[in-house]
Image (spheres, coloured by chain):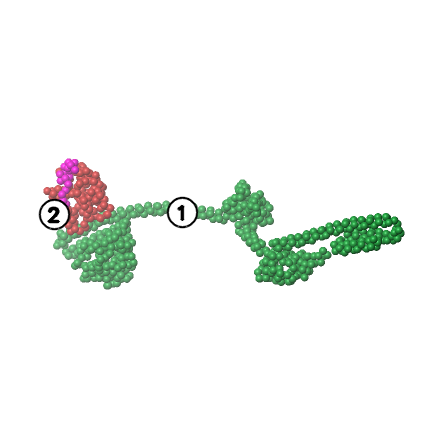
């Protein structure tokens, strides 16, 4: 069941998208990948705006893999937006960045990121990372309702809190 | 009774009276007596010659004559007696008066402040009063009859020659003699005193010199006072400041050389003039005010104003004016000290101008610093943007190069020849090196900018953690021996980790081919600090290279044999600097290296 939920990859660098797809394939991740090329598109997708309003085609992701340095809107701005959404703020986010910039790390966690990973350069390492993501986030981890049952269900559930 | 017998009695009486009179009766009385006696004699002789003629005249007549002459005699005697006793009384009064006068004179001489010595006409001492005794050191009894020169020894103060005794001079000239100035009296005990004296002759009524009286006094105190006064006068006269005495009406009474040189008037020109001649028109009121304050006994100090010189030049002066009082305390004038402060004022003006300029300069400088700071800040911002870009945008293509090459190798190694495979491997190696270079530069930049708080660090545990994370530092690849326990030191965990990682990296990297790296870590206390040694069995570093070893981009060994970015040790030194420590190396080519870090002990 968990392996049918989609993963949203926010990444502007086509190479990195390619390497990530390759790594997930190597790690035998079966979840479909939705790709958005910048921060604004990421928000549009999550908000269901424009072409993303069709949730059957663009369902809310089970996990967001977010690059920090993107055009139009940065990863941190996306996190800030997410942070302000009552239900979506629960969406698990793994930040993938080119550097371990200390301020970025602090800010990302502050805004609700669940992990911060520096992009590995070597193919092998990237495969290792994909395997770890699969093993932890896609196998062991239990996700919040918004990722599995949708916004409405999440909203109802949160009322019971 | 026979007339002869009566005459005899009368004569005898007269003789007796005369006898007494010779001692006490003066000439007038003698004349009177002589007259009376002559009259009596005449009358007696007349009677004697006519006695026979008269004798036989009646007895009655004879008896009457006798009684009459007897009565006359008695009256005369009584009158005489009274006259004589009066004379005796007068005489006694005179003697008493003389005695009283002598006593008064003697008392006066002994009690006056001046010394008095009297001599006889030969110059021998006949009298000496107590002051004279004290000053000469002789007492009257010793000195009595002794020539004056012995008890009254005087010298000229300047030449120290014996001065001629004034008594001798008086005896020679017979007139009053004053002493020459600067005479010193040498007392019997050798003590010397400046004296002032005079000598006068003593004469008898007929003008004969019977002695000399010498009067003198000790002038030590007066001399000292004179000296002080002279010194003070000299000080006043030679002072650089103008010192002017003036009356309460403002008339100049004294004028020293300082006043002459400051105001240009000579003392002759100034004295008697009004002080107003020094006061410019616009300050007249001020001077009047000063005079009235002085009259109230006020003292005016360091009063800065303007005065006019003889040549009409205006000068800045500082005045100190004090009232001058007479011996009864009445204010009778003022002493005015004027200092020419024109130069001082000029200096002050220059100083003010300089200060102002300095202030302008400082403001300019501040503005420049501000602009520079702003510039620097924007540079730093740019640098940060550059670093951020370096870490993101430049690493992305490197990642792509490395990853695609790896993928090609992975997928198509068999299809490619050995050469192509090697090329691709070199591409990967290069990409990896550039990536590491970027990371090192970023690490160095981060160390430079990062705020560091020093705290106790368990350095032994930190080293073990580093080893645990890095397989290349573990057996069997390398052998690291920690000679613990290592004491905690004051440092910054992340920076220290970076330092030690780099040192250990180097230690395992720079070994001769085929040699297994062996590293010994131990500590050595140096003063209050702890020196942490990293001793390896590597290829060592020659002396020349050691000096620049810790500089940025210095690579001591050839590119091909030992890979590196040339930043590792620069990072070490930067980190150690930031932790207020030191770093160094002892090494010799082929004999391994001993790197050390020195940091403060944690327990102190």
Instruction: Provide the residue designation for mark 1.
Output: B361
* Chain coloured red here: A
Q: Which class describes the residues within 10 Å of circle 2: few (<14), some (14-19), or many (20+)?
A: few
In the image, the segment drawn in magenta is A136-161
Q: Which class describes the residues within 10 Å of circle 1: few (<14), some (14-19), or many (20+)?
A: few
Instruction: Provide the residue designation for mark 2.
Output: A28
Using the image, tell me which numbered label, if any, was put on residue B144: none
Give whichever of B310, B488 is nearer the camera. Answer: B488
Name the quadrant of the C terminus of chain B. Answer: bottom left
User: Which is in the foreground here, disc 2 or disc 1?
Assistant: 1
Q: Secondary structure at mark 1?
A: helix
Residue B319 position within the rendered picture, expressed as x and y whole percent measured from the top left: 52, 46
**Residue at the limit of the structure toward the front, as seen here:** B59
Residue B592 position within the rendered picture, expressed as x and y whole percent measured from the top left: 23, 62
Give whichever of B404, B165 is nearer the camera. Answer: B165
Q: Secondary structure at mark 2?
A: loop
2 and 1 marks in contact (CB < 8 Å) = no
Alpha-carbon span between mark 2 and mark 1: 73 Å
**Is-magenta flag for residue B94?**
no
Asked if one can make out residue B402 in the rendered structure from this viewpoint, the answer is yes
Give whichever of A18, A150 is nearer the camera. Answer: A150
Asked if one can make out residue B316 in the rendered structure from this viewpoint, the answer is no
Residue B521 position within the rendered picture, expressed as x and y whole percent measured from the top left: 22, 59
């Amino acid at each position: 069941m968990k392996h049918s939920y989609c993963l949203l990859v926010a990444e502007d660098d086509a190479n990195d998208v390619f390497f990530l797809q390759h790594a997930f394939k190597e790690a035998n991740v079966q979840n479909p990948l939705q790709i958005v090329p910048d921060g604004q598109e990421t928000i549009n997708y999550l908000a269901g705006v424009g072409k993303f309003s069709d949730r059957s085609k663009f369902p809310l992701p089970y996990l967001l893999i977010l690059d920090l340095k993107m055009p139009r809107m940065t990863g941190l701005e996306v996190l800030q937006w997410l942070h302000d959404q009552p239900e979506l703020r629960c969406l698990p986010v793994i930040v993938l960045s080119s550097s371990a910039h200390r301020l970025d790390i602090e800010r990302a966690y502050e805004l609700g990121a669940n992990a911060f990973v520096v992009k590995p350069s070597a193919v092998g390492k990237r495969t290792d990372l994909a395997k770890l993501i699969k093993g932890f986030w896609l196998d062991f981890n239990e996700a919040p309702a918004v990722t599995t049952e949708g916004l409405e269900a999440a909203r109802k559930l949160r009322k019971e809190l | 009774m026979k007339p002869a017998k009566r005459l005899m009695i009368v004569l005898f009486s007269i003789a007796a009276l005369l006898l007494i009179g010779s001692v006490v009766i003066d000439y007038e009385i003698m004349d009177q007596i002589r007259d009376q006696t002559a009259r009596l004699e005449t009358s007696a002789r007349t009677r004697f010659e006519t006695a026979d003629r008269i004798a036989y005249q009646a007895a009655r007549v004879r008896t009457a004559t006798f009684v009459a002459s007897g009565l006359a005699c008695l009256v005369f005697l009584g009158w005489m007696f009274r006259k004589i006793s009066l004379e005796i009384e007068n005489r006694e009064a005179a003697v008493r008066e003389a005695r009283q006068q002598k006593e008064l004179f003697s008392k006066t001489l002994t009690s006056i402040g001046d010394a008095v010595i009297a001599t006889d006409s030969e110059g021998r001492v006949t009298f000496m009063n107590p002051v004279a005794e004290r000053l000469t050191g002789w007492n009257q009894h010793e000195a009595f009859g002794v020539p004056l020169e012995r008890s009254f020894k005087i010298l000229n103060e300047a030449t120290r020659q014996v001065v001629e005794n004034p008594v001798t001079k008086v005896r020679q000239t017979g007139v009053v003699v004053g002493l020459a100035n600067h005479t010193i009296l040498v007392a019997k005990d050798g003590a010397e005193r400046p004296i002032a004296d005079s000598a006068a002759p003593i004469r008898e009524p007929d003008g004969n010199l019977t002695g000399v009286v010498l009067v003198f006094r000790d002038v030590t105190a007066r001399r000292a006072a004179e000296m002080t006064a002279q010194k003070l006068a000299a000080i006043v006269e030679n002072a650089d400041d103008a010192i002017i005495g003036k009356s309460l009406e403002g008339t100049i009474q004294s004028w020293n050389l300082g006043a002459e040189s400051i105001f240009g008037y000579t003392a002759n020109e100034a004295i008697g003039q009004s002080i107003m001649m020094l006061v410019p028109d616009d300050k007249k009121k001020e001077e009047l005010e000063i005079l009235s304050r002085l009259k109230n006994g006020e003292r005016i100090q360091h009063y800065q104003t303007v005065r006019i010189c003889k040549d009409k030049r205006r000068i800045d002066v500082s005045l100190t004016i004090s009232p001058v009082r007479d011996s009864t305390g009445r204010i009778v004038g003022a002493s005015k000290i004027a200092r020419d402060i024109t130069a001082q004022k000029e200096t002050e003006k220059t100083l003010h101008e300089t200060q102002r300029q300095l202030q302008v300069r400082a403001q300019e400088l501040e503005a420049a610093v501000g602009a520079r700071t702003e510039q620097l800040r924007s540079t730093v911002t740019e640098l940060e943007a550059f670093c951020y870009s370096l870490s993101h945008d430049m690493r992305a293509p490197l990642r792509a190069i490395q990853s695609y090459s790896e993928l090609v190798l992975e997928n198509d190694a068999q299809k490619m020849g050995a050469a192509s495979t090697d090329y691709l491997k070199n591409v990967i190696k290069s990409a990896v090196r550039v990536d590491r270079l970027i990371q090192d530069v970023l690490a160095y930049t981060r160390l430079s900018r990062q705020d560091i708080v020093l705290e106790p660090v368990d350095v032994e545990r930190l080293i073990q953690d580093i080893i645990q994370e890095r397989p290349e530092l573990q057996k069997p690849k390398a052998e690291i021996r920690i000679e613990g326990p290592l004491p905690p030191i004051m440092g910054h965990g992340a920076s220290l980790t970076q330092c030690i990682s780099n040192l250990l990296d180097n230690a395992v990297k720079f070994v001769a081919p085929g040699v297994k790296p062996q590293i010994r870590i131990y500590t050595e206390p140096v003063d209050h600090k702890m020196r942490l040694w990293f001793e390896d069995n590597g290829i060592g570093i020659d002396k020349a290279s050691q000096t620049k070893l810790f500089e940025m981009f210095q690579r001591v060994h050839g590119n091909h044999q030992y890979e590196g970015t040339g930043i590792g040790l620069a990072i070490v030194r930067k980190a150690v600097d930031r932790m207020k420590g030191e770093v160094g190396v002892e090494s010799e080519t082929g004999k391994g290296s001993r790197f050390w870090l020195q940091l403060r002990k944690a327990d102190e």
